[in-house]
């Protein structure tokens, strides 16, 4: 992963290389177009952002990732649980997910 920063505005985007696993391919297939600063790009869906943040939290122990997931849950409205929960189970993220859902 690396960042791209537009210094005049402070706009920052994380650039993430796609892994060769089934979830990463699904995440890539679901990306959504986004136009920022006159350029086209793609962003992950809110469900995939939750999954990625849960993975980062598990690996790093970072409370920032947990706060980010809580923010997505608080502001995103409904999530596609039929997509989200099978991947959470497959990736072994159930404990973190269950703890966050109790908040």
Image (tube, rainbow, N blue to C red):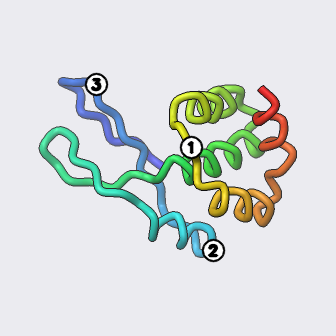
Quickly name the residue at label 2: 21
Is 73 positioned to the left or the right of 29 in the image? right
Q: What's the CA distance linking mark 2 and mark 1?
A: 26 Å
* Residue ID for mark 3: 10
Image position of 32 with respect to 59: above or below = below
Q: Residue at x 70, y 44 (%)?
A: 54
Residue situated furthest front in the rendering: 78
User: Which callout, 1 or 3, points to the residue nearer the camera?
Assistant: 1
Sequence-wise, the earlier of marks 2 and 3 is: 3
Does residue 57 sit above or below 82 in this rendering?
A: above
72 to 89, vertically: above or below: above
Where residue 44 appears, as percent x and y from the top left, is: 45, 53
- Quadrant of the rendered image containing residue 26: bottom right
Mark 3 neighbour density, 10 Å: few (under 14) some (14–19) many (20 or more): few
Mark in front: 2 vs 1: 1
Q: Position of residue 42 (x, y in %)?
A: 33, 55
Query: Viewed as shown, does residue 11 lie left or right of 55?
Result: left
Which residue, given by chain and number where applicable, does mark 1 sit on? 78
Residue 62 location (% of width, % of height)? 71, 31
Mark 3 residue element: loop
Quarter where residue 71 is shown:
top right
- Residue drawn at x 23%, y 27% as measured from the top left: 7
């Amino acid at each position: 992963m690396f960042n791209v920063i537009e210094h005049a505005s402070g706009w920052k985007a994380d650039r993430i290389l796609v892994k060769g696993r089934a979830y990463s391919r699904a995440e890539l297939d679901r990306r959504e177009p986004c136009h920022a600063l006159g350029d086209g790009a793609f962003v992950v869906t809110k469900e995939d952002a939750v999954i990625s943040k849960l993975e980062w939290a598990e690996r790093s122990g970072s409370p920032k990732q947990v706060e980010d997931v809580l923010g997505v849950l608080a502001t995103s409205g409904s999530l596609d649980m039929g997509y989200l929960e099978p991947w959470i189970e497959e990736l072994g993220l159930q404990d973190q997910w269950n703890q966050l859902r109790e908040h």
